[in-house]
Protein backbone atom coordinates (compact mmCIF):
# COMPACT_ATOMS: atom_id res chain seq x y z
CA UNK A 1 0.00 0.00 0.00
CA UNK A 2 2.83 2.40 0.88
CA UNK A 3 4.64 1.73 -2.39
CA UNK A 4 1.44 2.16 -4.38
CA UNK A 5 0.72 5.53 -2.75
CA UNK A 6 4.30 6.68 -3.40
CA UNK A 7 4.04 5.62 -7.07
CA UNK A 8 0.78 7.54 -7.48
CA UNK A 9 2.42 10.66 -6.03
CA UNK A 10 5.52 10.31 -8.24
CA UNK A 11 3.60 9.48 -11.44
CA UNK A 12 2.99 13.12 -12.50
CA UNK A 13 6.76 13.69 -12.55
CA UNK A 14 7.54 10.57 -14.59
CA UNK A 15 4.97 10.83 -17.39
CA UNK A 16 5.33 14.42 -18.48
CA UNK A 17 4.59 15.37 -22.09
CA UNK A 18 7.35 17.13 -23.98
CA UNK A 19 5.35 20.36 -24.19
CA UNK A 20 5.30 20.63 -20.39
CA UNK A 21 9.08 20.54 -19.94
CA UNK A 22 9.23 24.30 -19.35
CA UNK A 23 6.83 23.97 -16.40
CA UNK A 24 9.24 21.86 -14.32
CA UNK A 25 11.43 23.53 -11.72
CA UNK A 26 14.08 22.11 -9.42
CA UNK A 27 15.57 24.22 -6.67
CA UNK A 28 16.62 24.04 -3.06
CA UNK A 29 18.84 25.46 -0.39
CA UNK A 30 21.47 24.68 2.23
CA UNK A 31 21.29 25.91 5.82
CA UNK A 32 23.63 25.43 8.75
CA UNK A 33 22.88 26.06 12.42
CA UNK A 34 25.13 25.91 15.45
CA UNK A 35 23.37 25.70 18.80
CA UNK A 36 24.67 25.57 22.36
CA UNK A 37 22.36 24.45 25.15
CA UNK A 38 23.31 25.70 28.62
CA UNK A 39 21.14 23.62 30.88
CA UNK A 40 20.47 24.09 34.58
CA UNK A 41 21.69 21.43 36.98
CA UNK A 42 19.14 18.63 36.64
CA UNK A 43 19.74 16.41 39.63
CA UNK A 44 16.93 14.06 38.65
CA UNK A 45 18.21 13.29 35.11
CA UNK A 46 21.12 10.84 35.35
CA UNK A 47 22.06 11.11 31.66
CA UNK A 48 22.91 14.81 32.23
CA UNK A 49 25.18 14.28 35.22
CA UNK A 50 28.08 16.78 35.11
CA UNK A 51 27.02 17.95 31.64
CA UNK A 52 25.47 21.41 31.51
CA UNK A 53 26.73 22.60 28.09
CA UNK A 54 25.61 20.69 25.01
CA UNK A 55 26.33 21.63 21.40
CA UNK A 56 24.83 20.76 18.03
CA UNK A 57 25.66 21.57 14.40
CA UNK A 58 22.73 20.95 12.06
CA UNK A 59 23.13 21.15 8.28
CA UNK A 60 20.01 20.98 6.13
CA UNK A 61 19.84 20.43 2.38
CA UNK A 62 16.34 20.79 0.93
CA UNK A 63 15.57 19.83 -2.67
CA UNK A 64 12.26 20.91 -4.20
CA UNK A 65 10.74 19.64 -7.45
CA UNK A 66 7.66 21.32 -8.91
CA UNK A 67 5.63 20.46 -11.99
CA UNK A 68 2.84 22.70 -13.23
CA UNK A 69 0.64 21.72 -16.15
CA UNK A 70 -1.45 24.57 -17.41
CA UNK A 71 -3.21 26.47 -14.67
CA UNK A 72 -5.13 23.53 -13.26
CA UNK A 73 -2.57 20.92 -12.11
CA UNK A 74 0.44 21.28 -9.80
CA UNK A 75 2.61 18.59 -8.20
CA UNK A 76 5.27 19.30 -5.55
CA UNK A 77 7.97 17.14 -3.97
CA UNK A 78 10.40 18.24 -1.26
CA UNK A 79 13.14 16.15 0.34
CA UNK A 80 15.30 17.12 3.32
CA UNK A 81 18.75 15.65 3.96
CA UNK A 82 20.30 16.63 7.28
CA UNK A 83 23.75 15.59 8.57
CA UNK A 84 24.16 16.53 12.25
CA UNK A 85 27.08 16.68 14.64
CA UNK A 86 25.98 16.90 18.25
CA UNK A 87 26.49 15.55 21.72
CA UNK A 88 25.39 11.89 21.84
CA UNK A 89 22.91 12.63 24.63
CA UNK A 90 20.90 14.76 22.17
CA UNK A 91 20.39 11.76 19.85
CA UNK A 92 19.07 9.57 22.64
CA UNK A 93 16.99 11.90 24.83
CA UNK A 94 14.51 14.72 24.34
CA UNK A 95 15.63 17.58 26.57
CA UNK A 96 12.97 20.14 25.72
CA UNK A 97 9.20 19.68 25.60
CA UNK A 98 7.93 18.76 22.15
CA UNK A 99 4.14 18.96 22.48
CA UNK A 100 2.30 17.57 19.46
CA UNK A 101 4.34 15.35 17.16
CA UNK A 102 3.40 16.40 13.59
CA UNK A 103 4.82 13.14 12.19
CA UNK A 104 1.88 11.33 13.79
CA UNK A 105 -0.32 12.90 11.08
CA UNK A 106 1.37 10.87 8.34
CA UNK A 107 -0.18 7.76 6.80
CA UNK A 108 3.28 6.28 6.25
CA UNK A 109 6.83 7.43 6.78
CA UNK A 110 10.31 5.97 6.67
CA UNK A 111 12.80 5.96 9.51
CA UNK A 112 14.03 9.54 9.90
CA UNK A 113 17.54 8.50 10.93
CA UNK A 114 19.66 7.06 8.12
CA UNK A 115 22.85 6.75 10.15
CA UNK A 116 23.43 5.21 12.60
CA UNK A 117 20.78 2.51 12.28
CA UNK A 118 18.10 1.85 14.86
CA UNK A 119 20.05 -1.00 16.45
CA UNK A 120 23.35 0.94 16.56
CA UNK A 121 24.50 3.14 19.43
CA UNK A 122 24.62 6.76 18.25
CA UNK A 123 27.88 8.65 18.61
CA UNK A 124 28.20 12.34 17.87
CA UNK A 125 27.30 12.12 14.14
CA UNK A 126 23.98 11.29 12.54
CA UNK A 127 22.29 11.60 9.15
CA UNK A 128 18.56 12.27 8.94
CA UNK A 129 16.17 12.58 6.02
CA UNK A 130 12.54 13.46 5.43
CA UNK A 131 10.16 13.33 2.47
CA UNK A 132 8.46 16.54 3.52
CA UNK A 133 6.20 17.29 0.54
CA UNK A 134 4.47 14.98 -1.91
CA UNK A 135 1.33 16.82 -2.89
CA UNK A 136 -0.91 17.20 -5.93
CA UNK A 137 -3.20 20.22 -6.37
CA UNK A 138 -6.04 20.25 -8.89
CA UNK A 139 -7.79 23.57 -9.52
CA UNK A 140 -11.32 23.69 -10.89
CA UNK A 141 -13.74 26.63 -11.11
CA UNK A 142 -15.89 25.54 -8.15
CA UNK A 143 -13.08 24.29 -5.84
CA UNK A 144 -9.42 23.35 -5.42
CA UNK A 145 -8.50 19.79 -4.37
CA UNK A 146 -5.16 19.24 -2.56
CA UNK A 147 -4.08 15.64 -1.88
CA UNK A 148 -0.90 14.39 -0.22
CA UNK A 149 1.81 15.53 2.19
CA UNK A 150 1.45 19.27 2.63
CA UNK A 151 2.00 22.16 5.03
CA UNK A 152 -1.04 23.05 7.12
CA UNK A 153 -1.06 26.09 9.41
CA UNK A 154 -3.91 27.44 11.50
CA UNK A 155 -3.83 31.00 12.76
CA UNK A 156 -0.79 33.16 13.35
CA UNK A 157 1.26 34.28 16.31
CA UNK A 158 4.64 35.87 16.95
CA UNK A 159 5.92 33.52 19.65
CA UNK A 160 3.18 31.05 20.57
CA UNK A 161 0.22 30.17 18.39
CA UNK A 162 -2.37 28.27 20.46
CA UNK A 163 -4.59 27.51 17.46
CA UNK A 164 -1.83 25.82 15.45
CA UNK A 165 -2.48 22.24 16.55
CA UNK A 166 -1.65 20.21 13.41
CA UNK A 167 2.09 20.86 12.90
CA UNK A 168 3.31 23.50 15.35
CA UNK A 169 6.93 24.57 15.58
CA UNK A 170 8.73 23.58 18.78
CA UNK A 171 9.68 26.45 21.08
CA UNK A 172 13.40 25.90 20.46
CA UNK A 173 13.08 25.62 16.65
CA UNK A 174 15.40 28.02 14.81
CA UNK A 175 14.42 27.11 11.25
CA UNK A 176 10.78 28.09 10.80
CA UNK A 177 10.86 28.67 7.04
CA UNK A 178 9.27 25.34 6.12
CA UNK A 179 6.50 23.75 8.18
CA UNK A 180 6.60 19.96 8.58
CA UNK A 181 4.34 18.27 6.04
CA UNK A 182 1.36 16.18 7.12
CA UNK A 183 -0.78 13.82 5.03
CA UNK A 184 -4.18 15.28 4.26
CA UNK A 185 -6.92 15.78 1.71
CA UNK A 186 -8.15 19.38 1.52
CA UNK A 187 -10.86 21.15 -0.44
CA UNK A 188 -10.81 24.94 -0.85
CA UNK A 189 -13.98 26.62 -2.07
CA UNK A 190 -13.66 30.33 -2.93
CA UNK A 191 -16.62 32.41 -1.76
CA UNK A 192 -15.42 35.85 -2.85
CA UNK A 193 -12.19 37.71 -3.57
CA UNK A 194 -11.35 37.78 0.16
CA UNK A 195 -13.12 34.71 1.57
CA UNK A 196 -12.93 30.95 1.16
CA UNK A 197 -13.93 27.73 2.89
CA UNK A 198 -11.02 25.37 3.57
CA UNK A 199 -11.95 21.87 4.76
CA UNK A 200 -10.03 18.63 5.08
Image (cartoon, helix red, strand yellow):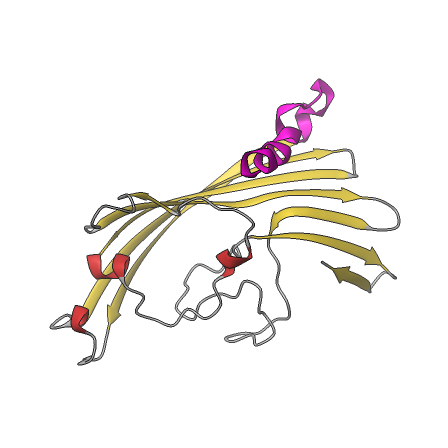
Q: Is residue 22 left or right of residue 30?
A: right
Is residue 87 visible to us here?
no
Q: Is residue 155 left or right of residue 106?
A: right
Q: Is residue 122 above or below residue 26?
A: below
Of residues 116 and 75, the one nearer the viewer is 116
Question: Quadrant location of the C terminus?
Answer: bottom right
The percent coordinates of residue 64 (x first, y second) are 54, 39
Q: Residue at x 58, y 70 (%)?
A: 164
Q: Is residue 75 above or below residue 180?
A: above
Q: Is residue 160 left or right of residue 40?
A: right
Q: Residue at x 51, y 58 (%)?
A: 104
Q: Is residue 90 left or right of residue 10?
A: left
Can you tell which quarter of the image residue 72 is in? top right
The percent coordinates of residue 154 (x first, y second) are 64, 67
Q: Residue at x 49, y 56 (%)?
A: 103
Q: Is residue 59 above or below residue 167?
A: above
Identify the magenta region. 1-23
Is 200 a magenta residue? no
Is residue 7 visible to us here?
yes
Can you tell which quarter of the image residue 157 is in? bottom right
Q: Residue at x 52, y 55 (%)?
A: 180
The percent coordinates of residue 156 (x first, y second) are 61, 71
Amino acid sequence: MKRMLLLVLLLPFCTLPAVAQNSISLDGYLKSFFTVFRLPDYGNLPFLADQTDLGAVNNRVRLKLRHQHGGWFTANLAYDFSPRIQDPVLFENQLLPVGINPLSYRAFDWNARLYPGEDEIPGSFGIFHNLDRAVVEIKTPPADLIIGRQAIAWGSGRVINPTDVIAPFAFQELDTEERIGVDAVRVRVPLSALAEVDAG
